[in-house]
Amino acid sequence: MRWRDLGIGLLFTIIIWQVLAWLVNRPILPGPAVVLYTFGRELVAGRLAGHFLVSTYRVLASIAISLVLAVPAGLALGQSPRLNRIFSPLLYIAYPIPKVVFLPVFLLLLGIGDASKIALIVVILFFQVLVVVRDQASAIRPELIMSVRSLGAGRLALLRFVYLPASVPAILTALRLSIGTAVAVLFLAESFATTSGLGYYIMVESWSRVAYTEMYAGVVAMSLLGLGLYYLADWLERRLAPWLFAS
Amino acid sequence: MSAPIVLLDDVTFTYHPQQPPIFQHFDWEVEQGEAWAVIGPSGCGKSTLLYLLAGLRQPTAGTVLVEGQPVPRPRASIGLILQDHGLLPWATVWENAALGVRMGHFYARKRAPRDTPRPYPPALPLSEVDAWLKRLDIHHLRHHYPNQVSGGQRQRVAIARTLALHPNLLLMDEPFSALDALTREDLQTLMVQLQAELGVTTIVVTHNIEEAVFLGRKILVLHVPPNEAPIIVDNPAAGSPAFRASKEFWEMTQRLREMLTPAARR
């Protein structure tokens, strides 16, 4: 998305927000001006910046770990129909399980620090990334594989020169899908049994003490986190998959 | 006389045990430096023959030797060019042409499995790639992606990629079928020139009679399976760009056409 489009989108969001605030006309929905002012004040003077950094770290770490685990697994399944036959029933069962319900288990096993939140998000993202990468890798035309094999490529060279680059768009798509999920799950995981993060800031520090403008400042921070990650994915796509933009 | 570069000895190949074999007790020899065309109707097994030579398929029975060695897997000294889809869509023209050479560097320290020829490409200098792109008139396109160049140019990239590895045997499966007539003739002429320049043994599989006659100094005719004895047509006049305009060319296409019509077989 271009900067101009981003500006127009933001402007519309603020206008709709302001209109809704006037219509509702209650403390639970303050207007954008006061919220943005609070956001700035909390960022500089309050603890918002700290919570923002903690949440950013958790999301980035979860995404990185899930990519490191799921991409090789997806490539392995995608290039071997036999492996895929063995594991696809397991995936078929595991994929639709709402893994977020295991939050209490992770809290018990890994404690209330970063590890439980990161582990929960990793478990959720792992399957999303795995399935997308696997499907992309198995969709490579056999003619392409044959012609690269005819150059003398063994399994390793095929992975390095064909399967891995072929999955870059799939990895980035999976990344984009993951961002929304990761931020949402993070909010849930941070909203209880913890002492840091934007979820904690929104639910515990603000909402529970009826500080609605601070709460919305937290919502703005969480939205900026998601938006920033989307931009990161766009930037990565331009860097890693330039052929998608050549015409 | 030197040993044949390709030797099929009593080869039987079948995809399914229930179906008739594509080849049955089939013998065939190709000498070093020859230019062959393989022609036949669809389903006759001409692509299968190429895959057997390329190491992409294994014979059900019998022996396939290339350069005096069996081909249990593809090896870089045997080049293969397919009709399409052979280029990496995410790599530029230069990167595609350099793929084999880069894999040579990737495998530079890897040795061959015991008692078999080394299947990996040699670690040649990357400057070879530029030389080939220039020879094939596509050097100016080196930063383009495959979807930004024409079908004929894509096939030139595939040729550059294969020839950059100095193959001893060049296999082509319907290499120009997807191209328009003028581009096709242009590339056929190029192949005749390259064959003369390099002396590389070539085997072109085609369903196009004119292409077979223009490119093949020897023509192997396949029929509906099972193929048992090879039917070989000598075509010594082929091998020069001017051949296409000659009377012999026309006569040879007529002869092949008669051989390929189903009525002629019975």
Image: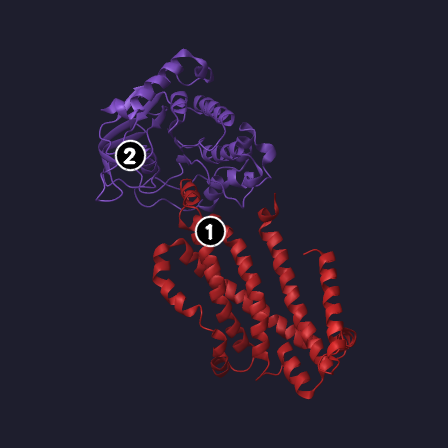
For mark 1, give the secondary structure. Answer: helix
Residue type marked 2: Leu
| Residue behind mark 2 | B65
Q: Which chain is purple?
A: B
Callout 2: few (<14), some (14-19), or many (20+) C-alpha neighbours within 10 Å?
Answer: some
Residue type marked 1: Tyr
Q: Which chain is red?
A: A
**Observer-nearest of A106 and A8:** A8
Locate residue B244, reporting x and y percent. Answer: 44, 17
User: In the rendered structure, the residue with mark 2 lies on which chain?
Assistant: B
Quarter that holds the C terminus of chain B? top left
- Coloring scheme of the render? by chain
Horizontal side of residue B25 vs A118, given as left or right: left
User: Residue B37 occupies which quadrant of the picture?
Assistant: top left
Locate residue B125, reporting x and y percent. Answer: 51, 37
Residues marked 2 and 1, same chain = no
Instruction: State whether residue B3 appears in this view.
Output: no
Q: Which mark is residue A163?
A: 1
